[in-house]
Image (spheres, rainbow, N blue to C red):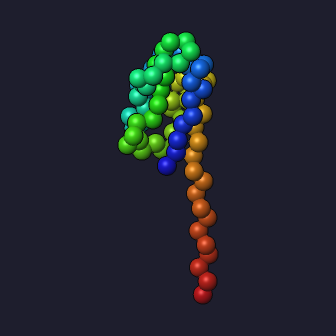
Amino acid sequence: MARIEVAVQKCKGCGLCVTACPKECLEMSTKLNERGVNYPVMTEDAECTGCTFCAMMCPDAVITVYREKKKKKEKAQA
């Protein structure tokens, strides 16, 4: 599972990140930032894969994607 972090006050509310998400993990918030625009937030049932499409689509680079590190499998001891 992954998560995103949005620099809320820098977001201009274009919504490109929402349309870019293949898993529909993002929606525009009902709250406003200092610019008076809605900003993206993860949905409650988000199953984010960490694909970074939202971050790549963002024209102002205000989205950071964090992925969980996979744990290394322990070697089987015989």
Provide residue 15's location: percent of width, then percent of height: 45, 20
Q: Is 29 left or right of 56, judged from the image as shown?
A: left
Q: For the C terminus, which image quadrant?
A: bottom right
Q: Residue at x 53, y 18 (%)?
A: 33
Residue lying furthest top in this view?
35
Q: Is residue 68 above or below residue 74?
A: above
Which residue, as the protein is rendered here, is positioned at the far bottom? 78
Q: Is residue 72 visible?
A: yes
**x and y, in percent, of residue 75 in the image:** 62, 75
Give the vertical position of 25 relative to 62 (above or below). Answer: below
Where residue 71 sits in the image (x, y, percent)? Answer: 59, 62
The front one of 13 and 67 is 13
Left/right placement of residue 57 relative to residue 22 reads right
Quick check: can you spot residue 20? no
Closer to us: 7 or 49: 7
Picture mark count = 0
Q: Is residue 44 above or below residue 12?
A: below
**What's the residue at 61%, 72% (across, down)?**
74
Q: Position of residue 45 (x, y in %)?
A: 37, 43
Give the residue drawn at x 56%, y 29%. 6
Q: Residue at x 55, y 12 (%)?
A: 35
